[in-house]
Image (cartoon, helix red, strand yellow):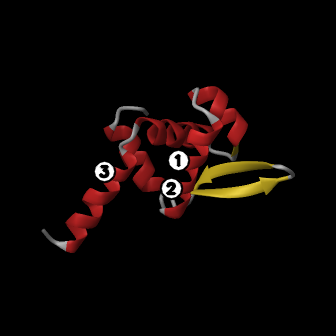
Amino acid sequence: MSKKLKKITEEIIFVFNEQKLLILQQLYECKDEVCGCDLIDKIGITKDLLSYHIRSLREREYIEEVKCGQRKKYSITKAKLPLVREILKTARLI
């Protein structure tokens, strides 16, 4: 398997998780920064689980974080926006 194909396969496996897809969908649809507490309410997951998925999405540079006082707001990185769009289309979430 080529390195490029292996990398793409790893990204697909990484992101095709229900909670990660829902987080990306909410961020994509909003087109602005979204507060973590709003994601908890909209997706219906615990704060700990959201933190876990946010951390992994940030590590792979799918999303970026901006502190706003004590709260954190999230958005999709510009570099990953086209990929996220295609992922959500493939998952039929947009």
Position of 13 compared to 32: left or right?
left
Q: Earlier in the sequence, mark 3 or mark 1?
A: 3
Q: Are marks 2 and 1 in contact (CB under 8 Å)?
A: yes
Report the residue marked by disc 3.
13
SS for dot 2:
helix
Which image quadrant: the C terminus?
top left
Residue kind at label 3, given as amino acid type: Ile
Residue at image location 42% in from the left, 35% down from the top: 18
Q: Residue furthest front?
A: 48
Residue at image location 78% in from the left, 56% down from the top: 67
Instruction: State the mark number for residue 56.
Output: 2
> Tag count in the figure?
3
Please identify the quarter of the rendering in which residue 34 is found. Answer: top right
Instruction: State the mark number for residue 53.
Output: 1
* Disc 2 from disc 3: Cα separation: 13 Å
Q: Are marks 3 and 1 in contact (CB under 8 Å)?
A: no
Residue kind at label 2, given as amino acid type: Ser
In the image, residue 42 above or below residue 85: above
In the image, residue 25 above or below residue 68: above
x, y percentage for residue 35? 72, 42
* Disc 2 from disc 1: Cα separation: 5 Å
Which image quadrant: the N terminus?
bottom left
x, y percentage for residue 39? 64, 35
Residue at image location 35% in from the left, 43% down from the top: 16
Q: Earlier in the sequence, mark 2 or mark 3?
A: 3
